[in-house]
């Protein structure tokens, strides 16, 4: 399964192939929400590589209004809060308050193990804590450091959006949420802002709050991060 389509098809194909995966063998392209960095190339992924798209109706409506997705032939709808089934793999979808039409986070369950894909969350809403408690591993947004955001180049309205209840999680908010994950083996910090964060700062904040019980990784913005095992 491939989650989101924010980078171009050529890059996606190359990055997967570097780790022994062929993009044409992907069974599902699952879209979380309608923002550019998550959906912009979905049409290319389908037409060039034949990937079936899984998306909510409202997300597709907004994505088609905002982006040139082109003709889509194979679209499968899901409702945020429901489940998708692919053989013995279950994907739970979790509604989020992020400022999108109908955003979703995901939990992938297979062979008794659970992996969370929790980005673009809005804020650490109460329903997330039992989700994190159920996980064996997680990709989680750690978008910004408050001091870097405050002193950074973004206009005031965008700063308020990012730190508001429909924006993103800060490093500290992410770390505090991970404290609920007693069964977690590792966490990969994702969706780090290029302007308002730093990987070393994100890691140090998490280690300060969570301690050494977890293995931490960071997902780079421009290079594939390698493969992780749950």
Image: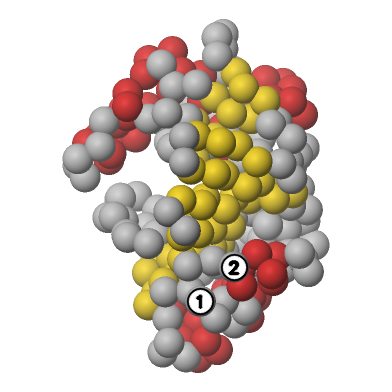
In the displayed structure, 198 sits above or below 23; it is below
Point 51% across, 76% down: residue: 183
Residue 44 visible to the viewer: no
Q: In which quarter of the image is residue 174?
A: bottom right
In the displayed structure, 50 sits above or below 192; it is above
The local secondary structure at tag 1 comes to loop
Tag 1: Cα neighbours inside 10 Å, few (<14), some, or many (≥20)? few
In primary-sequence order, the first of circles 1 and 2 is 2
Point 56% across, 36% down: residue: 85
Residue 22 visible to the viewer: yes
Residue on which disc 1 sits = 183
The number of numbered discs placed on residues in the rendered structure image is: 2
The local secondary structure at tag 2 comes to loop
Residue 172 numbered tag:
none
Residue on which disc 2 sits = 134
Q: Position of residue 70 (x, y in %)?
A: 56, 12
Asked if the residues shown at circle 1 and circle 2 are in contact, with their CB atoms under 8 angstroms apart, the answer is yes
Q: Where is residue 206 in the image (x, y as percent from the top left)?
A: 50, 82
In this rendering, position of residue 183 left or right of residue 219: right
Point 69% across, 71% down: residue: 129
């Amino acid at each position: 399964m491939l989650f989101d389509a924010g980078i171009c098809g050529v890059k996606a194909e190359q990055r997967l192939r570097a780790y022994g995966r062929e993009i044409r063998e992907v069974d599902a392209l699952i879209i979380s929400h309608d923002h550019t960095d998550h959906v912009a190339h979905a049409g290319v992924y389908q037409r060039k590589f034949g990937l079936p798209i899984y998306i909510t109706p409202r997300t597709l409506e907004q994505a088609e209004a905002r982006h040139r997705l082109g003709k889509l032939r194979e679209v499968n709808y899901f409702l945020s809060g429901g489940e998708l089934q692919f053989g013995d793999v279950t994907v739970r979808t979790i509604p989020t308050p992020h400022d999108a039409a109908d955003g979703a986070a995901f939990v992938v369950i297979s062979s008794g193990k659970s992996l969370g894909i929790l980005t673009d969350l809005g804020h650490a809403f109460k329903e997330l804590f039992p989700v994190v408690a159920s996980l064996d591993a997680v990709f989680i947004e750690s978008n910004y450091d408050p001091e870097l955001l405050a002193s950074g180049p973004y206009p005031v309205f965008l700063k308020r959006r990012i730190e508001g209840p429909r924006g993103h999680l800060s490093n500290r908010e992410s770390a505090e949420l991970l404290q609920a994950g007693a069964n977690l083996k590792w966490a990969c910090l994702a969706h780090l802002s290029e302007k308002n964060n730093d990987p070393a700062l994100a890691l140090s904040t998490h280690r300060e709050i969570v301690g050494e019980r977890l293995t931490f990784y960071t997902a780079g913005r421009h290079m594939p991060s390698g493969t992780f095992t749950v």
